[in-house]
Image: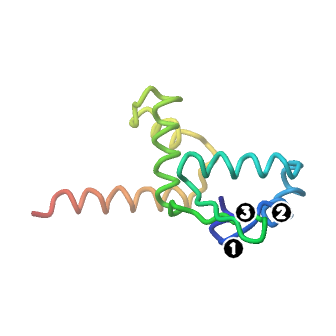
Amino acid sequence: MNVVWEEQPVSSRDVHDRVADGTGWAFDTVRTILNRLAKKGALKSEVRGGTAYFTSLLSREEARQSALSWIAEKAFGGAREAMMQFLVSRHDLSPAERETLQKLLAELDNEESEP
């Protein structure tokens, strides 16, 4: 999806060329993934000159929200609190990440207390 968001419209070959070294995926694997994402409504496929080009129908934010909701449901039974506790209790959060998290929570508290 990152390749699609960065270069859309993009062909299966273009996506493969960008991800093959890092993933080891064959061209057919990339094409299958893109076609499945199109079937699920995440991508739009348009054929030009015999080549399918893909554009995203979801923003990065929408895709993240969808993925996070899926993870919360599948891995934590829908318990978002348990998911957040798992994430923040990990010991590999840097001091800067912890500070950012504290600021975000403080901002949420301030927004909720405003009329």
Q: In the drawing, does residue 93 fall left or right of residue 70?
A: right
Q: Amino acid at mark 1?
A: Glu
Residue 65 location in percent, x, y? Answer: 46, 51
Q: Secondary structure at mark 1?
A: helix
Q: Amino acid at mark 3?
A: Ala
Q: Quadrant of the C terminus?
A: bottom left
Q: Secondary structure at mark 2?
A: helix
Residue 103 location in percent, x, y? Answer: 39, 62
* Label 3–label 2 contact, CB within 8 A: no
Residue 7's disc is 1
Q: Secondary structure at mark 3?
A: strand
Q: Amino acid at mark 2?
A: Arg
Work out whether 4 lies above or below 112.
Answer: below
Judge depth for marks 1 and 3 and give the one in front. Answer: 3
Residue 13's disc is 2
Q: Determine the residue positioned at 90% across, 57% down.
A: 21
Judge depth for marks 2 and 1 and give the one in front. Answer: 2
Mark with earlier residue (1, 3): 1
Per the model, the C-alpha gap separating discs 3 and 2 is: 9 Å
Front residue of this view, candidates 82 and 33 = 33
Mark with earlier residue (3, 2): 2
Judge depth for marks 3 and 2 and give the one in front. Answer: 3
Q: Determine the residue positioned at 46% across, 32% down.
A: 73
